[in-house]
Image (cartoon, helix red, strand yellow):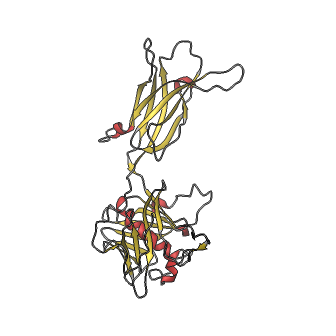
Amino acid sequence: MGHEETDSGGGKESTEKEDFNNLIQFPEVQVVEVLLEIVGVRNVPDGHKGKLSVVFSKTRPDSLFDAEPRLSILSEAGEKQAACFQCEARGELRFQLLSSSPSKLQVWRAPKSLGSASFSVEEFLSPVVTQLSVEKWLELTPGKADAKPISIRVSLSFTPPTRFPSVLHMVEPKPSWIGSCFVRKSRHAKRWTSVVAGNETELLTLQMSSSDGAALKVIGGTDSGETRVLAECNGTFWSLLESKWSLKLTNADKPVLELSGPRVVKVFSGRKLDYEHKHCGDCGERRSDKDFMTLVEFSKQHPYGKAVGLLDMRFGSFEAKENWLVLPGILSAFILTTVLKKERRIPRKRMLLPSPKEVMIVA
């Protein structure tokens, strides 16, 4: 996504008050946890000698579940085997009955499919969740016209559908080269930071902009190439989204910052509440609490606070549990990571008023 360089005095900035709700088009994903067991099978043709098992998958692409695990059948194997997994609360689960025949020559043979059946997760949970578990027979297709259809009995249990957190990543562009002489662009050139979703789709681009004597601003770029001011530093605080939200330091050590607007969100250093015992499964190491900041909403419903977001300062990612937090949250995350990218702790005095030089240099 390319944009013209923008400063506080020109470009394509939009100065009119606008509705920012649709600035980031981020689909809401409902997720369920599933406990699955294959209980039994019936009407298997006489004389069948193969070992039976069931492979299951989703019939349509699923952002949370794309595997094809295999389960034994309780009535055949004589022991219970179950699978627990997460998937989107839509689409269908597909079950395929496989027969593995032993070979006297000890040569591997591909299992033979005896048919498949589907179970609609979406229909079971919609429009209103009335039950969360079911055990039923599913007829396999295709079947033989002159025989009873083979059926498998499945046992399914679901958790109530919940919103899957939105995870956004801030990606800085790599250094580029101009022309055939391989002249490297200046480190002081204005560059855009891409905000991408987990599937690497670019949702928005951001840039910290300033000019002599002008306030620092965060400029946002859209697909159409239009730019608009999304945040502005007003001396002691940041005004976000046409003053709908503000980000400022607090007088107390805990919390460190406050994001206020239609809701009150306080920002704490480290991982708190729901995020306190969350470890980094991808890194192979236990992450330091100093790498994170937790956003906690305070309200009448949650007087002691409810964790609604997590900022990973080290890797530049932001997780929002609710849609209303996505845009003000990613703007706050961009401001914090831009100002503090060279710091390992929070500099109280310089936090909201970095110099233009510090902001514009990209390491």
Task: Classify residue 226 by image quadrant.
Answer: bottom left
Q: Position of residue 9 (x, y in %)?
A: 37, 81
Q: Position of residue 47 (x, y in %)?
A: 56, 12
Residue at x-position 52% and y-position 58% = 278
Residue at x-position 45% and y-position 69% = 333
- Residue 212 visible in the picture: yes
Tell me the quarter of the image containing the C terminus: bottom right
Q: Position of residue 360 (x, y in %)?
A: 50, 78
Q: Position of residue 170 (x, y in %)?
A: 49, 65
Task: Classify residue 235 by image quadrant.
Answer: bottom left
Up-down relation of residue 111 to residue 33 (above or below): above
- Residue 272 visible in the picture: no
Up-down relation of residue 247 to residue 35 (above or below): below
The front one of 192 and 142 is 192
Task: Classify residue 320 by image quadrant.
Answer: bottom left
- What number of labels is visible? 0
The front one of 282 and 1 is 1
